Image: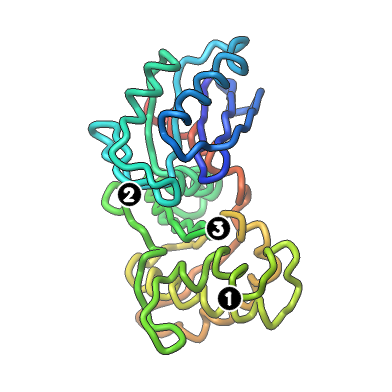
Amino acid sequence: MYLAIDVGGTKTLLAVFNTSGEIVHEHKFPTNHNYQKFLTDLEIASKAELKDYSIAYCCCAMPGKIDRVRGIVLHCGNLKWQNVAVKEDLHRILKVPVLLENDANLAGLHEALLVQKKYSNVLYVTISTGIGDGIIINGKIDPSFADSEPGHIVMKHDGKLQKWEDFASGRALVQRYGKKAKDLNDASAWKQFAKDVAQGLDELIAILQPQIILIGGSLGTYFHKYGDFLVKELEKYQNTMVSIPPIVQAKRPEEAVVYGCYDFIKQHN
């Protein structure tokens, strides 16, 4: 059995996989923003929820920048954790080998493997509270871009310089319209959202030249509301030097992280 741990800003998900890649058990608990209290909650949950499973390997997905050599999370976005020894701490609690990787990279890995037969250069973009990405080449996380943070690209918007995720993320959508994506049905609002997303995607396309772009995260779930607008907006940027690849919804926009944990374990075990 393999254990996937997806640590988010509000909740942490434990998912137990069998060796065939099927989830056999899941458990969620609130993510305590105090790191030591989080570890205590994790230990309690693992003892209660994993006692019936023989876990051989664990992969933990973290929303932040990672020192992969030392197994340390250097910065952790909304959680404000800094320089925490996640790999060592999880190994102490779980008593199994632990892998550590950025959550967007893992989600991108899983989604890229689902289209690997057709595309070898994949850009996965997750749009949720913020904006992240995974750049997958030949079925592997590209180490050259493993720490990329596209949401922090600064560009001119509404007459001033702003971070991309400050005007094109799920958080920005709620701030602008006062509604969550699931409750927003105004076509003009989604058209503007697509225009804002396209502004950043155009920069990524010009630099990375991906064969396909997969849109995931919580806003990936609602791709049907803005996908056509997004494609039409990006077509305006197309030129002889930069062609626009297919832009499609991720197959598992909100579950790809834990499945990516399983894939990552398989690649490193």
Residue 266 visible to an observer of this rendering: no
The local crowd at label 3, few if under 14, some if 14 to 19, many if 20 or more residues have their Cα within 10 Å, is many
Image point (47%, 15%), residue name: 56
- Distance from disc 1 to disc 2, alpha carbons, whole Å, reads 26 Å
Q: Earlier in the sequence, mark 3 or mark 2?
A: 3
Contact check, label 1 and label 2, Cβ < 8 Å: no
Task: Give the structural element (helix, strand or loop) at label 2.
Answer: loop
Q: Quadrant of the C terminus?
A: top left
The image's mark for residue 128 is 3
Q: How is the image coloured?
A: rainbow
Is residue 31 visible to us here?
A: yes
Q: Secondary structure at mark 3?
A: loop
Q: Earlier in the sequence, mark 1 or mark 2?
A: 2
Amino acid of disc 3: Ser
> At which x and y percent is residue 148?
33, 56
What is the three-letter code of the residue carrying label 2? Ala
Q: CA distance from mark 3 to mark 2?
A: 19 Å
165 up-or-down from 161: above or below: above
Eye-nearest disc, 3 or 2: 3
Upstream in sequence: badge 3 or badge 1: 3
Q: Which residue is mark 1?
A: 194
Is 21 left, or right, of 64 in this rendering?
right
Left or right for 239, reference 248: left
Q: Is residue 240 above or below residue 152?
A: below
